[in-house]
Image (cartoon, helix red, strand yellow):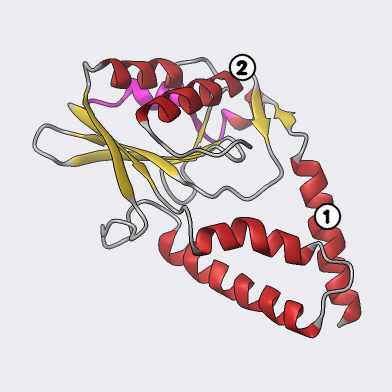
Amino acid sequence: MKFRGLFSVVFFALISVSALKPFIMDPAEIFSHHRTSRDYIAQLEFDYIETYSFQRGGKYDEFAIELPRLMMLPNPTAEERQKINTLRKEQNIFQRENGFLFASNRQLNKSAAPIGRFSKDAPEAIALLEALNIEAMKVYHWMCWPVYRDAIVFYKASGEIISVLHICFGCDHMTLGSNKDIIADNRCYEALRGIFLEIGHPIQPR
């Protein structure tokens, strides 16, 4: 038991240290498996967008702050070990049920809060598209698990959802859903971060 606990702490410490410095992925390798943000928006035909903030505060902050702190303890007490196990179990449940903006039954994530709504011709929408249109030349891969806290929903005029783009600014990662990652340049994330902050998304510094 002690060995397993030590292994978990050491493993997490290595991952945490690695996460401080991303490595640059080879575009030739990743493009064969995933679409780029430029390819993604090129096929989108929409009339308006909505942006959402979700998975922030409450339990989500416990997973992001308290769990790593406990796992880094060199000699956790029995109570702290129990807390680690409890948070891990809760985190697995939350990730299965609340990992994306919409559940499989199309129900909106309970933590979701709409931030902005813009027509496709609005300056905010144009700026977002320009950011996503940046060619993916320098693609960083942070050694951490993405937690999607921001999203863009693309709609037809009728209100039909065309696509939902989930963004994790903690590790520069985008996805449309399970196994549907979108590859983007580092400059794209920097531009998106600035736009989202101006819109009103409560994005924390990395």
Q: Position of residue 170 (x, y in %)?
A: 59, 40
**Which of 43/157 is in front?**
157
Which of disc 1 and disc 2 is earlier in sequence?
1
Q: Which residue is mark 2?
A: 137
Instruction: Relative to 159, say whether 40 is above or below.
Output: above
Q: Based on the displayed image, in which of its 4 quarters is residue 140 positioned?
A: top right
Q: Given this view, does label 2 or label 1 mark the residue nearer the observer?
A: 1
Q: Which residues are magenta?
A: 31-45
Q: Is residue 136 magenta?
A: no
Q: Is residue 43 magenta?
A: yes
Q: Which mark is residue 126?
A: none
Q: Residue furthest left?
A: 158
Crowding at mark 1 (Cα within 10 Å: few <14, some 14-19, many 20+): some
Identified at 63% across, 71% down, the residue is: 88
In the rendered structure, which amino acid carries the disc numbered 1? Answer: Ala
Element class at badge 2: loop
Q: Quadrant of the C terminus?
A: top right
Q: Based on the displayed image, in which of its 4 quarters is residue 161 positioned?
A: top left
Q: Which residue is mark 1?
A: 13
Q: Position of residue 151 (x, y in %)?
A: 38, 40
